[in-house]
Image: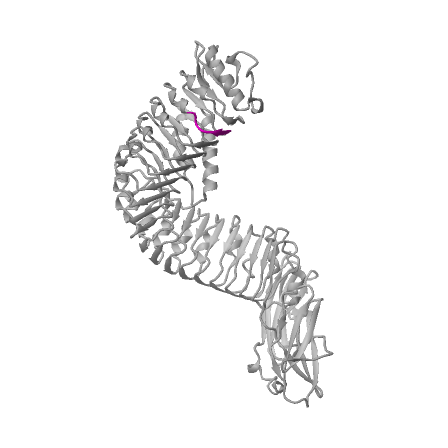
Amino acid sequence: MKITLLLTALGCMLAPVQAQDLDVILHERRAARHALHKAMPPSHQAMASAADSMVLVDLYHDTQGVNWVVRTGWLSGPVSTWHGVALTPSGRVTGLDLQSNGLSGALPNALGNLDSLRTLYLANNFITGAIPDSVGALPKLEVLSLWSNRLSGAIPVSLGRLLSLRDLLLFDNDLSGSIPDSLGNLQRLDRLWLDFNELEGPLPAALFRLSMLREFFLDANKLTGPLPSGLSGLTSVISLYAGHNQLTGPLPPELKSLPALQNLSLAHNSHDGTFPVEIAETPNLVKLLLSGNQLTGSIPPALADRSKLTTLELAGNSLTGPIPAAVGLIRELRILDLGGNQLTGSMPNTLGWATALRMLDLSNNQLSGSLPQSLSNLTRLESLDLSANQLEGSIDPIYAMTRLRTLRLRGNRFTGALYGGFGFMPLLTEADLAENAFSGTLEQMFNRKTSLEVLRLEGNQLEGVVPPSITQSTQLIDLRLANNRFEGLPKLASLARLDTLDVAHNRLTFEALEPNAHVASGRFNYAPQDSVNTALAEDGSDLVFSVRVGGSSSAYQWFRDGAAIAGNDNDTLRVPSADPDATYHCDITNAVLSALTLTSRSRHSTDINTALDPSASPFTFALHPGYPNPFRTKILLSVEVALPVHTTVTIYDLWGRAIMRVLDQRLAPGRHLVPVDGARLAPGTYLYRMAAGNFQAARTMMRVR
């Protein structure tokens, strides 16, 4: 029963569960086929004939028996005690099972003398050279298992004489040349594994008349030409895999007439023509893998009638038109990959009905409109890729996908703030939201610890301070925040795995950048940054220009009308009010961050005449939200002033009593951070009020235990 179940399930075990590279597919197939071999029953043991014994001795010496993993009994006792040898009562060798045993070297031609041999299991070793032609002289052979070795050369034509053969398993070698027509003589063949070799040329039509064949694997070779006519002869085939070759021509409609077919892969070939409706009508389809071809036309709605379909991969073709609403009616569908086509229109609302989905890839199409609210029903989804479309609006439906591991939305037109829903995705390791139009701050995105390893937010309209709570995401490896409007960055030293940090093209100064100079073990991209503000004030008979960029290793060079001013190397420049009209700016460098020069915006000496006009300032008066809020011990407040002005921030309890003043100084125009240590505050709600000239504003904050 165990063997029967494994044989029945093998097609599903070997098929790629989603778009994968060949190394992954190869690893999975090795593991699945090794597990299948372990289920094979032992054979009868007895005494051996002298002739057969000599063949075994040759095999031992030619394959470096002294280095085998297990060589119990070999050459030191009765053949019946030799590891892996099965005998008939009359002493003839009927089975050899030396799979995964460290055999190396070439197989001896003498193997052809074991004319009672029924099973030969030598898979998963290091055997080299050609398959001996003499193997074709084994009239009783039922299983020839040589997969995962280093065999080379052509498949012997003589194998076509093995008329009792049920399994021909040559997967994962270096076999070359064409597939011999003689294999079409093997009418009892149940499994034919020729995948992951270097076979070339056209497919012999004779192979497609093997009416008992159930597993037909040709993946990852160099086969060319069209699929031959007469496919209907494969009346028992369950799994037909011929992907990753160089096959051409249209897909034959005869595929519809294969009554047992469940798993079909013709992916990554050069098949062309329109998508045949007949394939969509194949009655028992479970997996349909046609990615990486040149198919055109629309996706047939008839696929909705395939109630057993779990995997539909059509990526990398030239399919057009909308996604059929009927696709959402395939209730067993777990993998839907339509990426890299030319699909148009909106995402159908019915996609949210396919609640078994684990992977959904619609990337690199021309889809438009907003996300259907019904997507919130896809609570089992683990991977979502909508990159490179023209989708827009909110991503709110995605926050319900609490099992997501990978989220890719790059290159769309999504808008709105990024909320705390990411904190309810505990398995999410990659979030690529780059090149959209997300706005607001990140204060809510990191209100919970995440498992993120890759976070890409570059090319949006995000602003404010990157919250300190981002350091809770201790698994971060790749953090990209470039091309936004961030003005502050916490120290990220606690992110021990961080390899890439990209914060270029923001509004960051050395105050934020210098503490993070050595945080990323690989790449730290911090230049350029936007220009900084040049404050201008009048102090008696002097004009005072100043910049505030922080950093303990910063150096300042002031310029008057583009010419360097000697003798002034600090953040403030004083010039007489009577100085003739001139334009001033400052370049700031930093010894730690040598790739970045911050340039202050030029100010003219006559700007003092408008310095008291808020409308002339690039800033405004505002009291921004504090973060985090609620907080436990520390909160970061943010104030903004449009003019040089004395500013205070005071914290009050709910009865109006002043508790503490956390800011009391003259500020230059710009946005300023105010750190507050609230460890001595009792848990509860407090007011904090900002006063700057005639401007006043208040907000609330809450301290929790």
Q: Residue at x 52, y 18 (%)?
A: 83
Q: Quadrant of residue 262?
A: top left
Rendered location of residue 521, percent (x, y): 63, 53
Residue 108 point in image, percent of width and height: 47, 22
Question: Residue sitting at 35 percent across and 48 percent down?
Answer: 293
Quarter-wise, where is residue 575 in the image?
A: bottom right
State which quarter of the image contains the C terminus: bottom right
Residue 153 versus residue 585 in the image, above or below:
above
Residue range (magenta): 126-132
Residue at the extreme right of the image, as rendered: 567
The image shows residue 516, relative to residue 613, as above or below, that is: above
What's the coloring here? one colour
Q: Nearer the viewer, residue 131 or 704?
A: 131
Residue 392 locus on image (x, y percent)? 41, 62
Asked whether 635 falls inside the magenta stretch, the response is: no
Q: Nearer the viewer, residue 446 or 511?
A: 511
The reply, left or right, for residue 330 in relation to residue 98 is left
Q: Is residue 129 one of those drawn in magenta? A: yes
For residue 313, say whether it is visible.
yes
Location of the N terminus (image quadrant): top left
Residue 48 in view, yes or no: no
Toward which corner of the image does residue 681 lie, by quadrant? bottom right
Residue 244 higher or lower than 65, as above or below:
below
The image shows residue 68, relative to residue 488, as above or below, that is: above
Q: Residue at x 48, y 49 (%)?
A: 404
Total marks drawn?
A: 0
- Percent across and percent down for residue 73 are 55, 16
**Residue 71 shown left or right of residue 215 in the figure:** right
